[in-house]
Amino acid sequence: MVLGRISVACDGVLGSDKQIYRENISILGRNIMDVFEAVQERRSIRAYQDMPVPREKLEKILEAARLAPSARNAEPWHFIAVTDKEKRKSLSKGRYAKFCAEAPLVIVACGDKEASPDWYAVDVSLAVENMILTAQAEGLGTCCVGSFDEAEVKQTVKVPDNYEVIVMLAVGYPKGKLDFAGKFLHLARPRKSLSDVVSEETFGKPYAGKKADGG
């Protein structure tokens, strides 16, 4: 549907430029589908194969974080990629963080409180979501971890005082059928419907969905 709508817009473009326009739109449409597919397929993974994350995939994930939007373009973030076994073990001390010891990669996402006092946590969160979706597109699983003692994490990976540890992101190849915790959580707590979480115009006013378009 996206491609159909956009193709109409190129009717006023002439000659070879029109072909280039169509090719660019085609690429754009494919990427839109890829992003939404990654959103749909993403799951929080808590069981990982004993396989390292290839360096080129890691760099792509980190680049996705770097390209995230931020208030005033302050980019108040720093990401620490941790693969060392002992450090990962130290990062897994939280009650709900045990699988970080098994994950081949843990990314510690930090926000600079001085660079953007009001927005650093929001900005870092946007960057982390970029990493999650890029990892998904690369065939990797992820899980956000908020179960940690910040002082211990800071000591383990030597985070300066002006930074706050916002979240840790476990990354790796999913173990698949053995991720019992994730499967149980999805069964016990299914996703809310769109009508449960969306209003239209004012809070509480039911969202009309496709009906508003006449669809």
Image: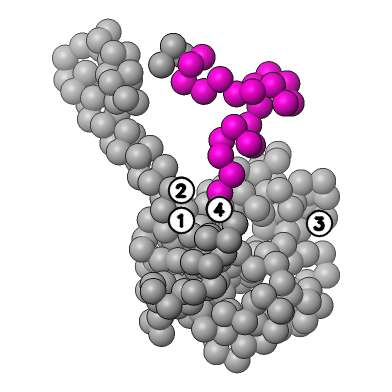
Q: Position of residue 116 (x, y in %)?
A: 78, 49
Asked if the residues shown at circle 2 and circle 1 are in contact, with their CB atoms under 8 angstroms apart, the answer is yes
Q: Residue at x 42, y 42 (%)?
A: 36
First-in-chain label (4 vs 3): 3
Name which residue type carries label 4: Pro
Q: Secondary structure at mark 1?
A: loop
| Relative vertical location of residue 95 with respect to residue 136 in this rendering, above or below | below
Q: Which of the two discs, 2 and 4, sits closer to the camera?
A: 4
Q: Secondary structure at mark 2?
A: helix
Q: Residue furthest top?
A: 12
Q: Position of residue 179 (x, y in %)?
A: 47, 74
First-in-chain label (3 vs 1): 1
Q: Secondary structure at mark 3?
A: loop
The stretch in magenta equals 191-212
Q: Which mark is residue 190?
A: 4
Q: How many marks?
A: 4
**Mark 1: few/some/many CA within 10 Å (<14, 14-19, 20+):** some
Name which residue type carries label 1: Arg
Name which residue type carries label 3: Lys
Magenta highlight on residue 206: yes
* Residue 144 position by quadrant: bottom right
* Residue 53 position by quadrant: bottom left
Calculate the distance from the C-alpha at mark 3 to the C-alpha at mark 1: 30 Å
| Relative vertical location of residue 112 with respect to residue 201 in this rendering, above or below | below
Dominant secondary structure (helix, strand or loop) of the stretch shown in magenta: loop
For label 1, the residue is 42
